[in-house]
Image (tube, helix red, strand yellow):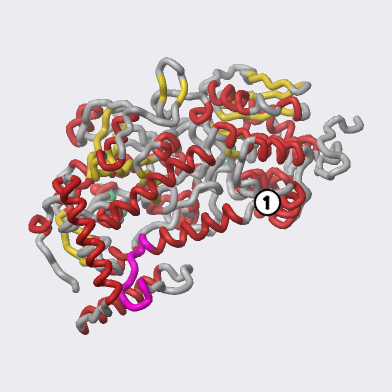
């Protein structure tokens, strides 16, 4: 069973088999073999059984959370591929989630109490009507809001109001005020300050409250003008007994300095006993040469168990960097030096990274259409269309994994670490000579149950066959060592800049973090291609999307990237029907998801509910802000 086949021998590539006639013949063969397969018991030689047992044990050890080890078809002991299991699990969870949503207001209130041990906020009934009226489907799924607001429940309303007003005066933050049911953006600034962020982010928020602002009481939001998270309170100040301290002016807690990388500020959010804080200097800046080259695959994925099961259930947004000091090197994110709050200020922003305390809102790029982030963007109409004429049908797409982008990837403090940033590592993997090889698991037949073979394949063969990846623009490259921007251009492949829709020619679209979260994801999901996404950022829609159903999560080391490709595309000796069908169903599900769950109105439903929760915190010591059927939506209060 463990064959070491010469990759080149059986790689006529499925593109040559794209021809319809071939496909029909292959389909007939598939049906016949399926028929034979179902009628026959598979008899394995002893070593095959050993292999299966070994994989099963390894597999169960890795995915202990998945209850039973599934057998395919009930008559074969052949282990299922890890991806097959993740897809099945994902589908089950998604079906369950859709099916269990509250249908009536009473059910939604009961579910709210069950989840959070609280009454819903005042105005909940109007919100419910707004959501139902918009055909919003996931009526109970707002854990993200509760997670983000939980720490701020400890503040008195007076302190919450003070911190908001003070935070909004800082350089990278804008205020959005609701007064008499009308929302406005303010760019007031502290004495001597200079606004640096993008006011468009506050304007996007303003736009998303238009549909319900008349229902809201007077209050204010501090909206970050940056894409990146800006609130990293130290572990000490975020402890419950310290949290509610009366803070002075927010300026006293903003680090303006660009001399320290975010990593320093991040590590202070960790428990004092965590490795990153216990031994900061040992970990912070060791010699770069002592770090394993980022794309040396010899060290990983060499065991069969890995090829079968080394896949991520979800993105790395929950990764605990406090326990993984070495991760510092893998994310440009940590080398940035933007201004941050080191105290617990309530600031709203689009992407939330581990350790940050920002409150998530939909990115304004999702609300304000732009050609670089919007699917089907029509230059004349100025907004996105459901169909993009540049998005080919499935059968006309290639089987390569596509990525284009700029060299953004973090900051440069200290400089000289670019090769380890996420985007740089992907491009390096795609374009640089690589002497290592990888064990690749691939289908050897189209029979059911699926049969698998592993082959050791040169990374050079894999990367040139499977990847269509390149930088289009060098930015923030001056500190690159050696040679600054020119040096970087020499070391990495730079290709012509392309519009967003150029990606759609591929079936697999890779998506990576830049300085912050990637604003492209929703457009890529809307396309007829499948999204493969690696990120450490949480976004507002995380409770609404199902990994392995709507998109494929990818690790930030990319160690499993070629096995993902092999599962869905090749390298098989025949056109891979099952893999291609599985990939297409993820592409289709992602496209449908964007249309059904990530419309602008879905984002408004999110923001509306967040506003009600925020209003309750804003007034909690002044009036009763809980929902009850009799005081429904009465914001007049008794002041
Ligand atoms: C917060 O709490 C810790 C102990 O949990 C204490 O050492 C510290 O002084 C407190 N105050 C601040 C401002 O961190
Ligand atoms: C928080 O930031 C302020 C302003 O830069 C600084 O004076 C203070 O030392 C910082 N506190 C911590 C715990 O890093
Ligand atoms: C780092 O480099 C210096 C100079 O090359 C060397 O003396 C030192 O031992 C190195 N430290 C580590 C941890 O490798």
Q: Position of residue 527 (x, y in %)?
A: 38, 37
* Left or right: where 165 falls relative to 264: right
Disc 1 residue lies near ligand 1 with CB under 8 A: no
Which residues are drawn in magenta? Answer: 72-84
Q: Quadrant of ligand 2?
A: top right
Residue lying at the far top of the rendered structure: 380
Seen from the viewer's position, the closer of residues 241 and 383 is: 383
Viewer-proximal residue among 17 and 374: 17
- Tell me which residue sits at (26%, 42%) in the image: 395
Residue under the image location 66 percent in, 24 percent down: 210
Q: Is residue 76 magenta?
A: yes
Q: Most extreme residue toward the left, as rendered?
A: 9
- Give me the residue at 23% from left, 65% from top: 32
Viewed as shown, does residue 408 lie left or right of 480?
right
- Tell me the quarter of the picture where residue 3 sits: bottom left
Residue 498: give x, y in percent of width and height.
Answer: 28, 27
Q: In the orientation shown, which residue stands out farthest toward the right?
A: 638
Which sits in the foreground, 193 or 489? 489
Indicate the position of residue 614 as horizontal and vertical percent values: 71, 37
Q: Residue furthest bottom?
A: 46
In the rendered image, which residue does mark 1 sit on?
102
Q: Magenta span: helix, strand or loop, mainly?
A: loop
Residue 361, relative to residue 55: is it above or below?
Answer: above
Q: Which quadrant of the figure contains the C terminus?
A: top right
Secondary structure beneath label 1:
loop
Asked whether the viewer can see residue 178, the reply is yes
């Amino acid at each position: 069973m463990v064959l070491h086949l010469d990759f080149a021998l059986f790689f006529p590539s499925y593109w040559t088999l794209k021809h319809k006639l071939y496909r029909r013949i292959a389909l007939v063969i598939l049906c016949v073999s399926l028929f034979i397969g179902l009628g026959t018991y598979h008899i394995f030689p002893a070593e095959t059984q050993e292999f299966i047992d070994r994989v099963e044990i390894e597999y169960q050890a890795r995915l202990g959370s998945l209850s039973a080890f599934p057998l395919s078809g009930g008559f074969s002991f052949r282990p299922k591929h890890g991806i097959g299991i993740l897809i099945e699990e994902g589908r089950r969870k998604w079906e369950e989630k859709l099916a269990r949503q509250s249908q009536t207001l009473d059910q939604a209130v009961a579910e709210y109490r069950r989840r959070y041990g609280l009454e819903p906020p005042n105005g909940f009934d109007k919100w419910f009507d707004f959501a139902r009226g918009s055909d919003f489907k996931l009526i109970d799924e707002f854990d993200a809001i509760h997670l983000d607001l939980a720490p701020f429940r400890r503040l008195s309303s007076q302190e919450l109001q003070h911190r908001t007003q003070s935070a909004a005066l800082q350089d990278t933050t804008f205020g959005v005020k609701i007064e008499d049911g009308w929302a406005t953006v303010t760019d007031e600034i502290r004495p001597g300050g200079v606004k640096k962020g993008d006011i468009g982010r506050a304007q996007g928020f303003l736009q998303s409250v238009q549909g319900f602002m008349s229902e809201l009481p007077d209050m204010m939001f501090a909206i970050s003008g940056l894409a990146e998270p800006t609130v990293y309170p130290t572990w000490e100040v975020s402890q419950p007994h310290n949290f509610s301290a009366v803070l002075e002016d927010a300026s006293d807690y903003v680090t303006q300095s660009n001399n320290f990388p975010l990593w320093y500020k991040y590590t202070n959010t960790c428990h004092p006993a965590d490795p990153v804080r216990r031994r900061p200097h040992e970990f912070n800046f060791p010699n770069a040469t002592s770090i394993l080259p980022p794309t040396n695959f010899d060290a990983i994925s060499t065991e069969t168990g890995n090829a079968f099961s080394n896949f991520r259930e979800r993105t790395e947004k929950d990764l605990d960097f406090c326990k993984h000091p070495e991760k510092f090197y893998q994310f440009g994110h940590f080398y940035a030096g933007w201004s941050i709050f080191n105290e617990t200020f309530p600031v709203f922003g689009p992407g939330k990274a581990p350790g940050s305390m920002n409150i998530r809102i939909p990115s304004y790029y999702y609300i304000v259409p732009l050609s670089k982030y919007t699917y089907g963007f029509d230059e004349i109409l100025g907004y996105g269309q459901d169909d993009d004429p540049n998005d080919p049908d499935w059968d006309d797409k290639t089987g390569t994994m596509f990525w284009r982008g700029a060299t953004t990837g973090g900051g440069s403090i200290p400089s000289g670490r670019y090769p380890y940033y996420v985007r740089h590592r992907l491009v390096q993997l795609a374009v640089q000579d690589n002497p290592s090889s990888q064990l690749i698991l691939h289908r050897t037949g189209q029979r059911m149950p699926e049969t698998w073979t592993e082959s050791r394949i040169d990374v050079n063969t894999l990367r040139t066959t499977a990847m269509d990846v390149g930088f289009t623009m060098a930015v923030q490259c001056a500190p690159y060592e050696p040679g600054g921007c020119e040096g970087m251009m020499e070391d990495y492949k730079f290709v012509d800049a392309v519009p967003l829709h150029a990606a759609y020619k591929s079936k697999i679209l890779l998506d990576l973090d830049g300085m912050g979260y990637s604003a492209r994801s929703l457009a890529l999901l809307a396309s007829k291609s499948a999204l493969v996404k690696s990120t450490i950022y949480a976004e507002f829609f995380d409770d609404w999307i199902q990994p392995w159903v709507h998109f494929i999560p990818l690790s930030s080391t990319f160690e499993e990237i070629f096995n993902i490709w092999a599962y869905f595309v090749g390298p098989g000796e025949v056109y891979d029907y099952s893999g291609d069908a599985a990939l297409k169903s993820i592409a289709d599900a992602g496209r449908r998801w964007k249309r059904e769950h990530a419309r602008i109105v879905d984002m408004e439903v999110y923001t509306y509910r967040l506003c009600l929760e925020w209003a309750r915190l804003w007034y909690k010591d002044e009036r009763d802000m809980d929902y009850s059927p009799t005081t429904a939506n009465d914001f007049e209060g008794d002041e």
